[in-house]
Amino acid sequence: MPRSQIVHENFLRRVAARDLPPGKMPTPGLSAAEAVALYRAQCTSRALDRTSRAMQKAGQGFYTIGSSGHEGMAAVAAALRPTDMALLHYRDAAFQIARAAQVPGQTMTWDMLLSFASSSEDPISGGRHKVLGSKALSIPPQTSTIASHLPKAVGAAYSIGLSRRRPPEHRTLADDSIVMCSFGDASANHSTAQGAFNTAAWTSYQSVPLPLLFVCEDNGIGISTKTPKGWIAASQAARPGVKYFSADGLDLYEAFAVAREAAEYVRSRRKPAFLHLRMLRLYGHAGADMPTTYMPREEVEAEEANDPLLHSVRLLDAAGALSPEAALGVYTETLARVNRVAAEAITRPRLKTASEVMASIVPPARSSAPSNGPGALAREAAFGPDLKAMAEPQIMSRLINWALTDLMLDHGEIVLMGEDVGRKGGVYGVTQKLQARFGPDRVIDTLLDEQSILGLGLGLAHNGFLPMPEIQFLAYLHNAEDQIRGEAATLPFFSNGQYTNPMVLRVAGLGYQKGFGGHFHNDNSLAVLRDIPGLILAVPSSGADAARMLRESVRLAREEQRLVVFVEPIALYPMRDLESEKDGGWMCLYPGPNERIPLGEVGVHGGGRDLAIVSYGNGYYLSRQAEAGLRASGVDLRIIDTRWLSPLPREALLEATRDCAQVLVVDECRRSGNVSEELMALFAEAGRRAARITAEDSFIATGPAYAATLPSAAGIARAARDLLGVK
């Protein structure tokens, strides 16, 4: 017999016999009506768990990770306001059900059953995934399996204080709201969670407002691996800057009282707190999981005997709120009601086509206040003597700095954050003077943790800001890439476009740094970014293009709610010359503040028909260096700067090479898994003759061999001559 059926029959038998588990008397705080309402939410959660298993068995449901044993989260919902953003653990159905009762017009049983059935009418995901979430209830959907939503929760909590001082246009959280995030005891050990705990403590320790409530649902096990007894309390109770609360989550009254105390502390003190709730996990991890295969049967049965619904029946009776007979009636009536609703939910339509599934990968555009650009007086005050310097050609790093200044003058919701971006002005000086120009609120020096940097950005985006986080080096992004892949990019997909993470992530990257850092500071692989659906990847090759593309990136994030990664080639930051020393051939004038390069527009240099060289970033620069020698050899060529690497501007590239006899792809990234593969496929499918030159599948060395594995100008020229049969 399935454990779910055993738990169900135990409940029926024990309540009828008034054989209830022992425990203390109800903690004051809940009225009779409030307690009964929470019990109803608990029963609905339990009924949904049972129904989900029946739906799966019948081939009509597709998700069985349940909330049984975690029904105490209904009490946490009651202790919060429905406007407090809640980033939920996947076992928190009772929380969402209880919160729905606080907001008129909700049909949570129907909504969740549509989600179980993967119906396209599911109001949160549109049938794409079973997630908890609701726009009306301020519950953004989360993956939550490894607590990857915790860094974002820290960022959202930080945004509340920032929005008090600098309200953004698309603000969503009230001044007195708090952010709650919940997670299991096993996922609390994940580096993502530990980083979030540390960042919250680090922030609070400096007396920076952070109204955040961590809720750890401690059921003592992660799938089959036990959490050491007492570990959560031992590791969290004395953390500086974060106040620790604990309660028995099996006790509805105590859980409410302590959750209310913790929430009031966070709301009044604007400081983070950690609420540790004892829970049970009934039925095992998921529908196919058999806990008796890795736990002694007597231990499983002991936990089932401690069923939180049995405790709720006992407490309601002791409080005079509801007799056991009436409680049993609520339970059986709820089961019947959920079954009736499920019978209708499974008949509702489901997604069928690729286009239907993919419809929410790109979020919807939003209305944003129009802008005429930064005013002359504001620019004069911000730039000072730099305004005169704009009359002369400059290097890329300086033009990016000026573009950031103009953008921040124009859009008050832009916030920069990252390690060393403020007082120091960044490792390469790209953000110099910006903190002096705009203040530490808008140019934030963060702690050294890429997950927290990106989480801060994602959380700020939830409250209407336009974040521009910086990752110092492309190699460091791998420490936190799931914040982009698993959180930012998936959010519009899971929420059917209702929640988004508009941002522009700046990353200093790629190779060709002379004698510095090796593979830690030179990383020539963009594969991890290019295969994320919905992400826009931009790589400029010149200072003027960088300024124009950065403006377009901000427009895409601000108006179209897109996730943009802007990779800045480190080796081109200081580049001055092109063909000979001191020729100044790679410096540019600063483009006017209204100039930008639209997404998908490629750059074309020259009009030759013998050969089209297609490249980007350093590869484009090197191709330009190879140009003079090739022309001297009689090669009539053009050089095309791809600029936008994801989505690849396929039609623009085909048009730009349409009348060329041969195409040479120059890719500074590794041969395997990078953009040259898609470019070669593009030209092959179009019937074009093409070859490629790429970097080797290698890490980059420090010292004189820094470019040994990378394409060179001479190598590009040789490859072009070989392709054309020219000596």
Image (cartoon, grey):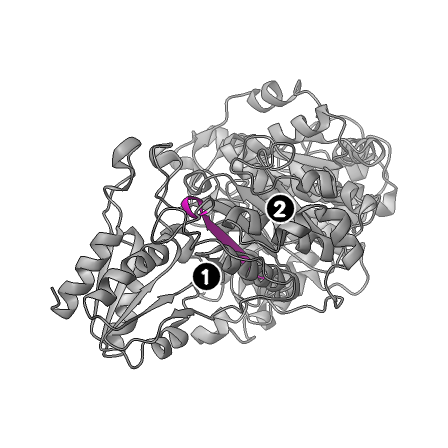
Residue 329 showing in the rendered view: no
Question: Closer to the camera: disc 2 or disc 1?
Answer: 2
The residue pinned by badge 1 equals 533
What quarter of the picture does the C terminus occupy? bottom left
In contact (CB < 8 Å): disc 2 and disc 1? no
The residue under label 2 is: 457
Q: Is 488 on the left or on the right of 415, as rendered? A: left
Residue 434 image point, x, y percent = 67, 42
Camera-nearest residue between 112 and 420: 420
Comes first in the chain, label 2 or label 1: 2
**Which residue is rendered at x = 66% and y = 31% of the image?**
200
The dominant secondary structure in magenta is strand
Magenta span contains residue 571: yes
Q: Residues within 10 Å of mark 2 (few under 14, many from 20)?
A: many
Spot occupied by residue 55 in the image (x, y as percentages of width and height): 50, 62
Secondary element under disc 1, as helix, strand or loop, is: loop
Spot occupied by residue 159 in the image (x, y as percentages of width and height): 73, 44
The span picked out in magenta is: 562-572
Side (left or right) of 96 relative to 146: right
Does any portion of residue 297 appear in the rendered image?
yes
Secondary element under disc 2, as helix, strand or loop, is helix
401 or 55, which is in the foreground?
Answer: 401
- The residue under the point 74% across, 50% down is 98
Task: Locate residue 124: give its quadrant.
Answer: bottom right
Q: Camera-side residue: 216 or 253? A: 216
What's the residue at 66%, 47% (across, down)?
386
